[in-house]
Image: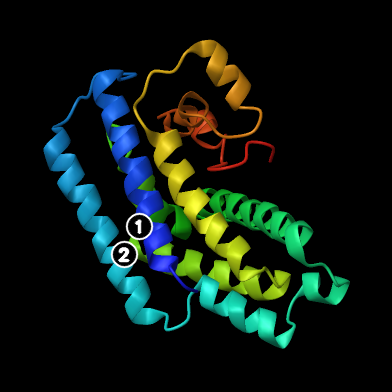
């Protein structure tokens, strides 16, 4: 898609810089480990995962959505849905798929061993939202590609979903202090940092809850 890389990069840098500044100005909790050391480690993993995905997958989610749109693949095409209705439906279903995938990575022991890399971060902050094992990233891409083809998601909806996912993952992992009233309102439509932080508890019952990254309804 035209300007896809620019849209992704602008969205990532805009949210990352905003949340990083917010963490400096109004941190939720004091850090227990060195921030520069953690950031170098976490962001290095981001670059590694980006390389791995681009090396292994010649066609990624948006590209597959373009092919599906051209060939009429997927449930949305069979239903004859298009435009805004198809786009919104695709974004919501993709978010549900991600939620179920997250539950699966906690429930299946061998998958949890990979996902545990995300939970091993001792201080949850904006970089934690992108700290994932390369194997989890690969499996996640396979699941996402299958979902895009099965749904017949519009290319723009897939791009929007991926940009929103990256943005909300950075937002709800950020170590930021938010007015309680604002948090209570926002968590009706989006997973907030205080809502998601419970998921990073060392207590098993709390870790196995609040699986959403984006929408809180599931």
Q: Position of residue 133 (x, y in %)?
A: 34, 58
Q: How is the image coloured?
A: rainbow
Question: Which residue does the numbered mark 2 point to in the structure image?
Answer: 49
| Mark sitting earlier along the chain (2/1) | 1
Give the alpha-carbon distance from disc 2 to disc 1, as whole Å.
16 Å
Is 144 placed above or below 169 here?
below
Quadrant of the image containing the C terminus: top right
CA neighbours of label 1 inside 10 A, class few (<14), some (14 to 19), many (20+): few
Residue 14 in percent (x, y) is at 35, 44
**Residue located 66% across and 81% down the image:** 68
Task: Specify whether 23 is left or right of 187.
Answer: left
Q: From the top left corner, tell me how far across and down residue 151 is, in percent.
A: 72, 69
Above or below for 11 versus 173:
below
Residue lying furthest bottom in this view? 71
Count of picture labels: 2
The residue that disc 1 covers is 9
Quarter of the image for residue 104 reads: bottom right
Residue 86 visible here: yes
Q: Secondary structure at mark 1?
A: helix
């Amino acid at each position: 898609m035209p300007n896809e890389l620019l849209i992704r990069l602008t969205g990532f840098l805009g949210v990352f810089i905003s949340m990083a500044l917010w963490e400096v100005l109004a941190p939720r909790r004091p850090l227990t480990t060195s921030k520069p050391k953690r950031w170098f480690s976490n962001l290095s993993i981001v670059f590694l995962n980006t390389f791995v995905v681009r090396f292994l997958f010649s066609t990624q989610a948006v590209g597959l959505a373009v092919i599906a749109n051209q060939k009429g693949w997927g449930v949305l095409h069979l239903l004859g849905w298009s435009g805004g209705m198809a786009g919104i439906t695709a974004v919501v279903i993709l978010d549900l798929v991600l939620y179920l995938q997250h539950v699966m990575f906690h429930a299946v022991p061998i998958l949890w061993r990979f996902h545990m890399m995300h939970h091993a971060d001792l201080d949850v902050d904006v970089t934690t939202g992108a700290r994932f094992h390369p194997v989890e990233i690969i499996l996640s891409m396979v699941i996402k590609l299958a979902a895009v083809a099965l749904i017949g998601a519009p290319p723009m909806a897939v791009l929007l979903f991926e940009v929103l996912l990256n943005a909300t993952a950075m937002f709800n992992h950020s170590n930021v202090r938010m007015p309680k009233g604002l948090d209570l309102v926002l968590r009706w439509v989006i997973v907030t940092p205080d809502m998601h932080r419970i998921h990073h508890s060392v207590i098993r019952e709390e870790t196995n809850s609040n699986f959403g990254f984006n929408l809180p309804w599931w």
